[in-house]
């Protein structure tokens, strides 16, 4: 896919997931959750995870933020449902590497490759990675924790 095509797709996907975020709700039966906050731009969210026998049975989020923050959280919830903790960790590492310009496995990303457009806007990388860091923290804890990116 050409860089122009990827840029157009990036914009379309970001706008779609921002306007109609998937899995945007509080989850009453979550057994892991964390609050994420980016005080520099005002993004704030809660990620809810329901882990059962090492598998992400359900995943959702609530909060507010810029289009990139909301879209990234929406894409994340779609990508990680049904994954094992190990698979989610691998995807977390690959998404982070992609957005920060490090070497990554494009085959592992699937449609999350569209988030690669974020690296062209370094100030927005924290917006796009906030939900991923928050999910990562939530899975490591069985009580409420907070993540702040600056």
Image (cartoon, grey):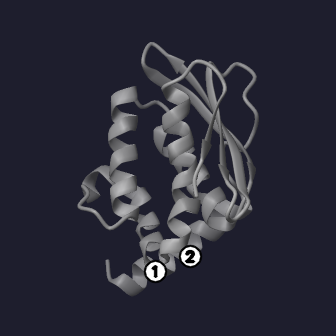
- Within 10 Å of disc 2 (Cα), the crowding (few <14, some 14-19, many 20+) is some
Helix, strand or loop at disc 2? helix
Say above or below: 142 vs 149. Answer: above
Extreme residue in the bottom direction:
4
Q: At 61% from the left edge and 65% from the top edge, which residue is drawn?
A: 68
Residue 83 visible somewhere in the drawing: yes
Residue 53's label in the rendered image is none
Extreme residue in the top direction:
53
Q: Is the residue under label 2 in contact with that under label 1 (CB below 8 Å)? A: yes
State the residue position of label 1: 7
Left or right of 102, for residue 80: right
Residue 138 pos. (x, y %): 56, 30
Q: Relative to the observer, which residue lies in front, 80 or 101?
A: 101
Q: How many marks?
A: 2
Left or right of 99, for residue 144: right
State the residue position of label 2: 11
- Within 10 Å of disc 1 (Cα), the crowding (few <14, some 14-19, many 20+) is some
Helix, strand or loop at disc 1? helix
Residue 8 pos. (x, y %): 50, 81
* Distance between the alpha carbons at the discs numbered 1 and 2: 6 Å
Q: At 54% from the left edge and 72% from the top edge, which residue is drawn?
A: 123
Q: At 41% from the left edge and 86% from the top edge, which residue is drawn?
A: 4
Which quadrant of the structure image shows residue 11?
bottom right
Which of the image's four quarters has the C terminus?
bottom right
Which of the image's four quarters has the N terminus?
bottom left
Residue 83 pos. (x, y %): 42, 31
Residue 84 visible somewhere in the drawing: no
Residue 9 pos. (x, y %): 49, 75
Q: Relative to the observer, which residue lies in front, 8 or 95?
A: 95
Q: At 58% from the left edge and 73% from the top edge, which residue is drawn?
A: 12
Say above or below: 122 vs 42. Answer: below
């Amino acid at each position: 896919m050409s860089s122009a095509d990827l840029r157009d797709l990036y914009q379309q996907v970001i706008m779609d997931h921002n306007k109609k975020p998937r899995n945007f709700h509080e989850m009453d039966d979550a057994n892991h959750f964390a609050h994420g906050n980016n005080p520099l731009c005002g993004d704030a969210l809660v990620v809810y995870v329901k882990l059962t026998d090492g598998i992400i049975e359900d995943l959702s989020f609530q909060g507010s933020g810029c289009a990139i923050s909301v879209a990234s959280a929406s894409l994340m919830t779609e990508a990680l449902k049904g994954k094992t903790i190990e698979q989610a960790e691998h995807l977390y590492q690959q998404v982070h590497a992609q957005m920060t310009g490090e070497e990554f496995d494009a085959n592992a990303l699937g449609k999350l490759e569209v988030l690669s457009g974020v690296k062209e806007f370094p100030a927005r990388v924290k917006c796009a990675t906030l939900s991923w860091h928050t999910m990562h923290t939530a899975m490591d804890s069985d009580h409420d924790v907070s993540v702040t990116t600056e």
